[in-house]
Amino acid sequence: MFFLNKTLYKVIGALFVAGISFALIMDLLIMPYYTNYNRGVTVPDVTKISLEEAEELLESYGLRHEVLDRRANTVYPANYIIDQAPSPKQIVKPNRKIYLTVNTAVTPQTVVPNVVNLSLRNAEIQLENHGLVVGTTSYESSRFRNTILRQSVAAGDTVGRGTVVNLAVSDGLGSRIVSVPDVAGMRLTEAQQALTRAGLRVGEIRFQPSREHTPNTVISFTPDEPQLTEGESLLLIVSERFDAREEIESGAIIDDTTAVNQQNNENQIEDNNER
């Protein structure tokens, strides 16, 4: 029994030592070699050169490449590199793949996705994935906040990559009735702030000359209702400096007094000469 226990302890000890040795070999030899530990390559700048030259340069650095995208840019000749990732001068592992964006003489086409009813963030991702550019985002009153209401380019249209698509986005207003603040007599900036706090919008601003009000004072607003649906727009009539001078729409007034006096003098000289 004692002999069996002693043999068992030796086996367990040997396995323990073998496990530690294997872990050390993996950590110090195998894994560093596999992951190229403590070795790095500085990524060269391959933009503004041809794809063929970029391939040769990357291979000489021990790096791989892949053409990620093709875009049309009139600044560069066809098949020239527009962009790269990772960017130049970054240190990467050997054999790392560099993703290239190549210029093409013909603008690649893409089909516009339908982003209506998507969230703003999701719509941006969808458009960018199709090679389109998100333009201006205007906000309108609708119930579901940050939801796309309209897109400037219709879904399903085939357009060039890089086309700008403008979006109309819901601001989450329009689901309740709000009280309209009386902004008549307020300064324009104060009126705008009061309407915004109430959940309303300032639509059009018209200026009207007035002697009774100081400039930039709200004279009246439309619609002049006690309550409106949240998000509605109001027209503001705002005072401006009253100009008392009026333009006289008549012909030019010619002062011919000098000409008449000169003619009289000439006539008088002629009479004296005749005498």
Image (cartoon, rainbow, N blue to C red):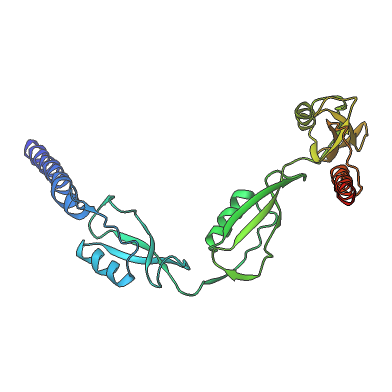
Residue 45, percent from left and from top: 29, 58
Q: Residue 231 sits in which quadrant? A: top right
Which residue lies at the image location 64% right of the left edge and 51% below the top edge?
136
Q: Position of residue 207 (x, y in %)?
A: 83, 37
Is 244 placed above or below 153 here?
A: above
In the image, is residue 134 above or below residue 100?
Answer: above
179, 116: nearer the viewer: 179
Q: Residue at x 30, y 72 (%)?
A: 52
Can residue 253 be seen from the camera position used here?
no
Do we see residue 121 in this rendering? yes
**Which residue sits furthest front?**
275
The answer to which of 12 and 221 lies nearer the viewer is 221
- In front of the other: 31 or 153: 153
Residue 74 horizontal side relative to residue 6, left or right: right
**Which residue appears farthest toward the bottom when viewing the image?**
106
**Position of 95 compared to 209: left or right?**
left
Q: What is the count of numbered marks?
A: 0
Tell me where residue 270 appears, x and y as whole percent: 87, 50
If the image is split into quadrants, where does the N terminus sit? top left
Q: Which residue is depicted at the point 28% across and 64% down? A: 64
Residue 46 left/right relative to 164: left
Which residue is nearer to you in this view: 248 or 2?
248
Q: Position of residue 185 (x, y in %)?
A: 86, 24
Query: In which quadrant of the rendered view does residue 96 lie?
Result: bottom left
Horizontal side of residue 92 vs 70, given as left or right: left
Q: Is residue 16 above or below residue 186?
A: below
